[in-house]
Image: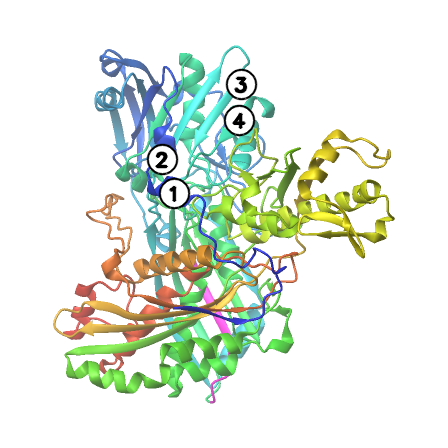
Amino acid sequence: MTSVTGESTTAGGVLGQPLDSREDPQLLRGEAVYVADIDLPGTAHMAILGSPVAHARILSIDTSAAERLPGVLKVATAADFTDVMPLPCIWIPGGVESHFPPHPYGLPGARPVLTGDTVRHVGDPIAVAVAETPRQAAAALAAISVEYEPLPVVTRADEALAEGAPQLHEAVPGNLNAYWTCGDQERTDSAIARAEVTVELDLVNQRTINSPIEPRGAVGDYNAATGEYTLYASTQGPHNHRFLLSALVLGIPFNKLRVIAPTVGGSFGTKGYLYPDMALVLLLSKALGRPVKWVDTRTGLMNSTVQGRDHRQHVTLAGTRDGRITAVRCTSYANLGAYPSTIGPGVATALMGRSITGMYEIPAAFCEVYAAFTNTVSLGAQRGSGRAEAAFLMERLVDRYAAEIGMDPAEVRRRNLVPKEKFPYDNGLGWTYDSGNYAPNFERALELAGYADMPARKAAARARGKRLGVGIATYVAICGVGPSTRMSKEGMLGGTWESANIRVHPTGEVTVTVGSASTGQSHGTVFAMVAADELGIDPAQVQVYEGDTLKAPYGQGTYGSRSYSMAAPAVALTARKIKAKLIRAGAVFLNVPEDKVVYENGGVHEAGNPENAKTFSELAMAMWYGWGLPPEIEPALDETTHFDPPDFNYPFGTHVAVVEIDELTGETEVVDYTAVDDAGNIGNPKIVNGQIEGSIVHGLGQALMEAAEYDENGILLSSDLTHYALPRAADVPLFTLDRTVTPSPHNPLGAKGAGEIATVPPAAAVVNAVVDALADLGVQHIDMPLTPEKVWRVLEGGAR
């Protein structure tokens, strides 16, 4: 069920309509082209040898046997790429001292394309083999002999910072990348010290593995005649990767590299990073004079692709006996993995720390983060990154506080919501919420969930041998990554604006090119709707291009739920430039003053005289000819916009989970789930609903089953889908979805991010529900994932 509460300020044309996704048919028919489907003439195949140990010095590498195998074209190690720069990190913790592996340009370094001296996690790439077939390349890897000198291993951030812990990088003393803070420590500590009530929790927001349907892949093609490189990659940011690879890794001219992102089978943040394979396929293509292709396996993905979450936190909430929260404090140990990913340090600090107060008006707040390196896969963004961890700690604290003072958890939340009249609202941690009306959203979620009926439902469940629990979680999610200047203060080494170009062809057809790059969000449908809505034409007339740095204008890519609130406004503003030009030209074509020209339904006509008119197609042809235009009006219709908003946008919402726990097995079933989200004005509700549902499932997975488990030797135990559980259809209920509409003032569409927001609250809602179901046993908290065994042990009187 889906309904809408609130008023939309969209133009009233095609925007806001639930149009079918134009991308779906080719996906459903299996006709979409992924990286794995790209077979250029003469393609050779690359395989990467990852370290089988988590920490060791490489004493020797012998590739001679591998080089003699049938079909093997080249075997390479770090010694073959001494002139290649390390991959850089471009988001450092802002405003604090930080330590990174070095980069020649004085930037923070991340990792070399191949490791030649010390491996620092299982899967650390140390050699590559290129052969005629994938099977031959894999056989070559097995023939490479490597001698290791084992080194001590550390896999937890807090333990990595302890005295005497194994050291990963010479340039990073004590494994501490950065100590980062936000908020007012003195005020917060004082408020906690004098509070009527304080509650504390030790939380583990466990490491999880991004698991898109398509593992990563890359194809490199070097043209010796022109000196040009082409990279096909499953990437969220082809433009960013073009710049970083050309200027900061390969040291080649920017205009000699083209990056193409074909169909991308999901990302969840994992494909927004530079990886060694991207540089390697380009370098080896040049060396061999033929295209080189690499496609990862599922186990390879789990041992090399950035992972998410992984905070260990001590959190404190202070308040009054009548339910007013007066302070919140967080100390978090963030596990960055063995190397800093392209933006990992910023994700682990700012996105989490500045978000901990959520939808609540809290007078004093402080967060400190110790970001540390360990012998695990690099950390990065995962759908809802930072914000999900922040919502989890805040919403667990609120429930713990409600239990301590004997007040209903809903009432505690109700008393602390930021009131409508206080927007824009400074949360005291660095975010200024653009707009919000939290109370109606909150009450609507409780109403739809049947919150008032829960006591009766609990009694009925107990009669069936089940324990029923209800959990509430609210959230605010910073989205629409930009503006560039603000991001620079957070430590981002680059711009975060977005761009769009519109060309109207002489036939009246329209081409929109955008710098954003879809990873499954139906951009081709939605951006066509935006252009069509502004221009007053049929969306079928609009073709959208993205994901190719040769065809599309400069841009930043898809991340941080930014496409509809960054790229779509760029499309809308560009369409308005087209309209303005057509009005000026229309005055010439209609032979009337400009203030008498009316633009309507894609054409122009004289005010009060609709017979004196030009259709959109007639205008397109007239502008193509350019006959009779004055010098100040250029022929043709071709406009570009680079949109950089004044601030972020802040979607919000309330989710309610209802669970039933089997008293004999400990199995937890989510029987009802209600989500009321507010992402401002919605472009296509059918697509947004799909994103909301997928986001909820992602969050349920962390709550109930997902965990990246490393043993004491740094071996990833959950390295395939037989050991790493993902939610399936049978694990989730039908959702009750609704939304309120609070437009953002920071872009012309009034849009807020939507693609990942519903991932933020589910883990907190489910854990709150499980603790509620077990409250009579004295249970105050259970760490995720809430597996049946873990819950059964609690039911049997085990550790809480």
Tell whether position 325 is magenta: yes
Q: Label 1 sits on what residue type?
A: Pro
Q: CA distance from mark 4 to mark 2?
A: 24 Å
Q: CA distance from mark 3 to mark 2?
A: 29 Å
Question: Depth check: 317 or 784 in front?
Answer: 784
Q: Earlier in the sequence, mark 3 or mark 2?
A: 2
Q: Label 4 sits on what residue type?
A: Arg
Residue 414, x across and y down, in percent:
48, 81
The residue at which mark 4 appears reads as 258
* Circle 3 Cα neighbour tier, 10 Å, few/some/many (<14 / 14–19 / ≥20): some
Instruction: Look at the magenta stretch and give its main secondary structure.
Output: strand
Residue 92, x across and y down, in percent:
54, 46
Tag in front: 4 or 2: 2
Tag in front: 3 or 1: 1
Q: Residue at x 85, y 53 (%)?
A: 595
Image height of 102 relative to 755, above or below: above
Residues tagged 1 and 2 counted as in contact (Cβ below 8 A): yes
Q: Label 3 sits on what residue type?
A: Glu
Q: Which residues are magenta?
A: 322-332
Residues tagged 4 and 3 counted as in contact (Cβ below 8 A): yes
Q: Earlier in the sequence, mark 1 or mark 4?
A: 1
Question: Taking the image as drawn, is residue 194 in sight?
Answer: no
Residues tagged 3 and 2 counted as in contact (Cβ below 8 A): no
Q: Residue at x 15, y 80 (%)?
A: 464
The residue at which mark 3 appears reads as 228
The residue at which mark 2 appears reads as 31
Q: Earlier in the sequence, mark 3 or mark 1?
A: 1
